[in-house]
Amino acid sequence: QVQLAESGGGSVQAGGSLRLTCTASRDTHSRDSHDTYCMGWFRQAPGKQRERVATIDGEGTVDYGDPVKGRFTLSQDDAKNALYLQMNSLKPDDTATYYCASTRGGTWNFCPMNQFEYWGQGILVTVSS
């Protein structure tokens, strides 16, 4: 089991920045020491489908959604079981609920969206023009 908790959302004007943090708690009893995970951020705006923002695979390769390339940066701190999303040059179109997500443990060298089994509650980001 994995529990994910997001923090850092809020309201900002266009052009501003926010940093989201996701903290993961994993059940270590059932965990294989060789396990890796895909983790990432997704977002969903009202009336729209959930979309990938940025994900990182078991080898550390980051994949960004086209709308955020060059503006958002995903990073992680394994020691803290934390995943960060630095969002710069925010636009009103970035307004959405942002979700942290994780796959189950395994060998992950790419991260299909339908393989993310564990999701946080979501955190709202609002960008005003």
Image: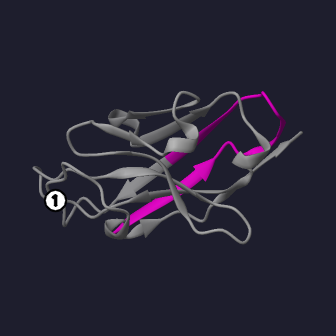
Read off the magenta span: 1-22
| Identity, as a three-letter code, of the amino acid under mark 1 | Gly
Colouring chosen for the image of the structure:
one colour
In this view, 54 is above or below 5: above
In screen coordinates, is 5 left or right of 77? right
Q: x%, y% of residue 106? A: 16, 59
Judged from this view, the residue extending furthest toward the front is: 66
Instruction: Report the magenta stretch's main SS.
Output: strand
Query: In the rendered image, is residue 124 in sight?
Result: no
Q: Is residue 6 magenta?
A: yes
In screen coordinates, is 113 left or right of 99? left
> Considering the numbered disc 1 on the image, is that residue within a helix, a strand or a loop?
loop
In this view, 35 is above or below 121: above
Quadrant of the image containing the N terminus: bottom left
In screen coordinates, is 59 left or right of 14? left
Q: x%, y% of residue 80? A: 40, 37
The residue at which mark 1 appears reads as 106
Q: Relative to the observer, which residue lies in front, 10 or 61?
A: 61
Dot 1, crowdedness within 10 Å: few (<14), some or many (≥20)?
A: some
Instruction: Write the residue at 75% across / 38% down.
Output: 91
In this view, 36 is above or below 14: below
Quadrant of the image containing the C terminus: top right
Task: Give the quarter of the image for residue 62.
Answer: top left
Q: Is residue 96 magenta?
A: no
Instruction: Write the residue at 57% across / 43% down.
Output: 67
Query: In the rendered image, is residue 97 in sight?
Result: yes
